[in-house]
Image: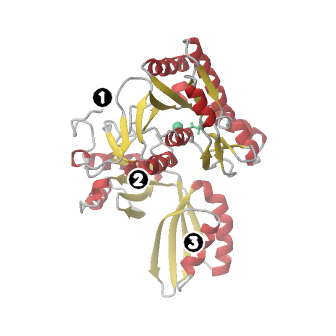
């Protein structure tokens, strides 16, 4: 008997009507002779609402209690979905993260899965039941509930697929798949029929909200193919997998945009060996990730160093940098939150010179100033004014002819 692992996101189970639809889809698969494990997110914006409630009490809740609270959304949806499946006459059981044996470290709110004891899950499957699993949550060895970071149900699903040695994990969402750009920003994006793990990883961490980056890492590590599909129709979606042959010589697979970063400029930094180490080591010691960095040489013994970090880390960084400023007699520190990072991603870039130049040309033509640039083998990112982000995405998308009519697309397939 085959095994199907499916994950349904919040919009797919937003109300009881949707839950009944999802139940039908699951039952259909079961009746076609498959074992089914369905991982489910919280209904609609339940998680945001729960976070809102906690904020009414305190800005800094104890993280253990925060996880205790925000993990409840998934418990509601698995119970309701199991009831709906039961109504359709199939044997079903819902399980929490703890019941399904997902053991994590104790880094509350962004816990990592350490191991999965799948014995309960296997027992239920052997009894021919459909198993509905609460995503996003696990439990420490001390039995405290943890959560896996926003969007963590994806990671639950892929981790279970790895544990159960499934080779496909179906991710059901409210879009038809992965697009060359955000359909809310670009009029005519193309839906990709497939994308490599590495490209997806870049897209996911650069602001394409469809998959949690960690789930893509897991999928790559265990060789699990992902099918990203809509739960609202029967379209084929996008496969995320190891891609050997590039789709129609696509050099650039997509344009991503994120305004989750803040630009920090250290003005008047002494220019001598060990200074960059001093600054960035101080940040690294607090686990603050630095993304783009530039250093300008000028005024003899004095430099400016500019870099970006996640907005999330800003308040912590401010404390650390104030101390560093004292220690190194830095003249000034300027924080700029009005920035956005636009990026192009494509595995074909390595072998095609001039891709970055084409991106800069698009920005120049649109009269958009580039503040910082960073590149890797499969991406080029530019930091620009946040106000111009959407315009930039559209200009770059058309520069590379990524639009659906330009590419005789399958956007509506
Ligand atoms: N409900 C959680 C969230 O909103 C987890 C998920 O949806 O994957 O982040
Ligand atoms: Mg999600």
On the image, numbered disc 3 is attached to which residue?
280
On the image, numbered disc 1 is attached to which residue?
412
Q: Is residue 191 above or below residue 128?
A: below
Can residue 184 be seen in the rendering of this structure? no
Report whether 62 appears left or right of 274. right
Q: Splitting the image into four quadrants, where does ligand 1 fall?
A: top right
Which one is earlier in the sequence, the residue at label 1 or at label 3?
A: 3
Residue under the point 63% across and 26% down: 94
Residue 158 at x, y percent in the picture? 50, 41
CB within 8 Å, label 1 to label 3: no
Residue 375 at x, y percent in the picture? 38, 63
Residue under the point 72% across and 47% down: 141
Give the structural element (helix, strand or loop) at label 1.
loop
On the image, numbered disc 2 is attached to which residue?
342
> Is residue 9 or residue 94 the one in the foreground?
94
> Is residue 285 or residue 368 the one in the foreground?
285
Q: Is residue 246 above or below residue 193?
A: below
Which one is earlier in the sequence, the residue at label 1 or at label 2?
A: 2
Q: CA distance from mark 1 to mark 3?
A: 47 Å
Give the structural element (helix, strand or loop) at label 2.
strand
Check the picture and name the quadrant holding the C terminus.
top left
């Amino acid at each position: 008997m085959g095994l199907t692992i499916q994950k349904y996101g919040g919009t797919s189970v937003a109300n009881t009507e949707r839950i009944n639809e999802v139940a039908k889809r699951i039952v259909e698969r079961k009746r076609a002779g498959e074992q089914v494990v369905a991982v489910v997110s919280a209904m609609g914006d339940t998680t945001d609402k729960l976070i809102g409630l906690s904020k009414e009490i305190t800005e800094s809740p104890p993280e253990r209690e925060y996880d205790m609270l925000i993990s409840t959304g998934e418990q509601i949806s698995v119970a309701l979905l199991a009831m709906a499946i039961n109504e359709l006459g199939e044997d079903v059981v819902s399980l929490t993260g703890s019941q399904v044996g997902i053991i994590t470290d104790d880094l509350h709110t962004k816990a990592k899965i350490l191991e999965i004891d799948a014995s309960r899950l296997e027992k239920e499957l052997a009894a021919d039941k459909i198993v509905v699993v609460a995503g996003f949550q696990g439990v420490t060895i001390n039995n405290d509930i943890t959560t896996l970071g926003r969007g963590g149900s994806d990671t639950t699903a892929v981790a279970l697929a790895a544990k159960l040695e499934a080779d496909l994990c179906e991710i059901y969402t409210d879009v038809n798949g992965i697009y060359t750009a955000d359909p809310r920003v670009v009029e005519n994006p193309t839906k990709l029929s497939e994308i490599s793990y590495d490209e997806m990883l870049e897209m996911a961490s650069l602001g394409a909200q469809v998959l949690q980056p960690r789930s893509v890492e897991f999928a790559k590590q265990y060789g699990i193919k992902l099918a990203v599909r809509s739960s609202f129709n029967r379209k084929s979606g996008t496969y995320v997998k190891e891609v050997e042959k590039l789709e129609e010589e696509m050099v650039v697979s997509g344009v991503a945009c994120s305004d989750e970063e803040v630009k920090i400029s250290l003005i008047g930094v002494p220019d001598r060996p060990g200074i960059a180490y001093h600054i960035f080591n101080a940040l690294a010691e607090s686990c603050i990730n630095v993304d783009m960095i530039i250093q300008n040489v000028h005024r003899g013994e004095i430099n400016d160093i500019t870099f970006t970090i996640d907005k999330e880390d800003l308040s912590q960084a401010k404390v650390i940098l104030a101390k560093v400023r004292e220690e190194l007699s830095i003249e000034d520190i300027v924080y700029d939150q009005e920035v956005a990072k636009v990026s192009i991603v494509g595995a074909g870039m390595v072998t095609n010179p001039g891709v970055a130049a084409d991106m800069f040309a698009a920005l120049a033509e649109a009269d958009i100033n580039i503040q910082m640039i960073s590149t890797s083998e499969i991406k080029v990112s530019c930091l620009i004014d946040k106000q111009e982000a959407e315009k930039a995405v559209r200009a770059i998308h058309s520069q590379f002819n990524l639009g659906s009519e330009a590419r005789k697309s399958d956007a509506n397939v």
